[in-house]
Image (cartoon, rainbow, N blue to C red):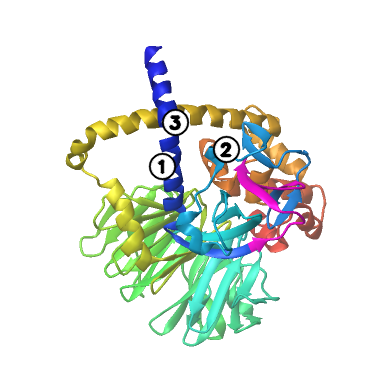
Amino acid sequence: MLIALFLTVIYQKMKPYLLLFSLFLIWKSVFSQDTLFVNKHQFNSPVQNVFDAEGSVFVKTTGQLFQLEGNQWTPFEQQFSKPYVFFKDNFYESDFIPNSELFDIKPIKELVPQRGEFIATAARAGSRFFIASGSELFEYEIRDHYTKSYHNMSIRDIYIEDSLKVISTYSGIFVNDTIKLKEVNYSNGPLLKIDSVYYFTWDEISLFFPPDSVVLIPNGTSRFSGKARKIISSGENLYTLHTQAVSKVLPGFELQPIHQGLEYLDLEEFQDGLVFSTFQGVCLKWDGNRIDTLAVIPTEVKDIYPIGDRLLLSSDVGVYEWTAQKNQLKKLVDKPFAVMSTIDDFGNLWVATENGLFVLTPDFPDPITIIPNVEFNREALLLKGEMLYVGAVDGLYTLNTYEIEKSYLPNLLNKLQVSSNERKPFWIIGGFILILVFVGGYFLYRKRKKERLISIRKSGSEEWNLKDLEEKVVMEKILTVDGLASTLNTNTVQLNRNFKKLGITPGKFLKKIKMKQAKELLDAGSSIEEVSKAIGYSERLIKSELDRD
């Protein structure tokens, strides 16, 4: 009891200093990054203040409280009579701005397009940062160590050359960010250029003539081969990867199988031959005459990345390395649900998984989290010079590997590698800070606990379970991960964390429900067109997933 009283007294005495320190941390975390002015928002009456609450941003003007929904400001139902409105456990109004809500605008005055310095408030939503000052609301974009585009689209392939950029998604194929192909609506494999000829694999194989012409190759698939996934060249020949066969392409594009009987996932050229992986975890090599088994992994091998005399094999249990010289297989990265990997010019190993993007550096033994809680896709990782493009179920992520190597990683590693010897001279200060953190953490815990209870009550459930969520998805016709997060009054990051406890990702959960709906509707006699409209998925995707003709 005495200890709690003592800590409370310390907290009250130090509260003004903690506030200043918090403002400094906000400024450091936000404006030490690449921050750009984006927009000045217009309202019918002067802006009073801005704040964030329950995962959203709110603006109070002299006449109304507004909530940010996408790019629109929507009037809030509850009315307030006082000039300022804030949120702490619940919305409350005030005749003045409390010190705890003030934002120090002086360090970033050059970023604010107004004369003079005014009392300011601030709020952040993802990469969007808002400052209310001088009766105006200004918006900024905070560029962290990555950018994101093609929002809410599932990226399946990325192709970039000097004058051509093709982004393939389940929502369409986009050329140079302006053209959407009409003949091909989705992709299940990479676009590849072989001897100046572009090949599209999307269950079938087509020729692509930039910028917008696609011609189907009649013999590109057959009953024995299954669905097309990839085409590559080795020597003077072309080879295809289908779900049920690896084949050599003969004149007239006739397919001659070189291996059948398994489910095939990836195909690459390696040491004057071919290597291909399977759903059964077997990695095989073909030298032009015979098939040899290189490695066997206890789960599906989703991606092969050849580098010199080595192969990097991405699987559901991590990334393995197979070395030709020693004929040896060892695990490099113990990250589950790995879908693709690559190595940049600095020797860093990048691993995309269904739970985030990680990098393994030569100077640090453990994988470092770069983008957490994002479900990345197979065949959607491209290293082009310094730029790394990674496709996910919710968009395209772009990173500059040079900037990450020279700036982001050193700062992060300095935090990870602080030795105990360096900390000893500061043990007294550290202990004092620990006490402050403990006290602050206690109050923050109480606040967040209340917020969580409010959120749970709004969602009408005391805990998440897959059965209740499935009913909610069906009843409210939820189609996207963002839509599910919005319905549950949370954000996609928190949504991924909660679903991780349930043993599934939000994207896979939604897809499973939609495919279940599709099967039930088809079994009941509905046409494929009717099913497509009912669940919001393309006819081709439904046929692909349910293996329906």
- Indicate which disc residue 375 carries: none
Q: What's the residue type where badge 2 is placed?
A: Pro
Helix, strand or loop for disc 1: helix
Q: What's the residue type where badge 3 is placed?
A: Gly
Residue 464: quarter of image: top right
Q: Residue furthest front?
A: 116
Q: Which of disc 3 and disc 2 is earlier in sequence?
A: 2
Helix, strand or loop for disc 3: helix
Q: Which of disc 2 and disc 1 is earlier in sequence?
A: 1
Q: Relative to the observer, which residue lies in front, 453 or 324? A: 453
What is the magenta range? 40-66
Left or right: 534, with 137 as reference point: right
Q: Which residue is mark 2?
A: 98
Q: CA distance from mark 2 to mark 3?
A: 18 Å
Rate crowding at label 3 as few (under 14), some (14 to 19) or many (20 or more) other CA atoms within 10 Å.
Answer: some
- Indicate which disc residue 21 carries: 1
Q: Name the residue located 75 percent from the left edge and 54 percent from the top edge.
A: 45
Look at the numbered discs 1 and 2 and tell me whether their residues touch, using CB distance below 8 Å: no
Counting labels gives 3
Q: Which residue is mark 3?
A: 440
Left or right: 240, with 341 as reference point: right
Left or right: 55, with 17 as reference point: right
Helix, strand or loop for disc 2: loop
Q: What's the residue type where badge 1 is placed?
A: Phe
Q: Name the residue located 27 percent from the left edge and 34 percent from the top edge.
A: 429
Q: Quadrant of the C terminus?
A: bottom right
Q: CA distance from mark 1 to mark 2?
A: 16 Å
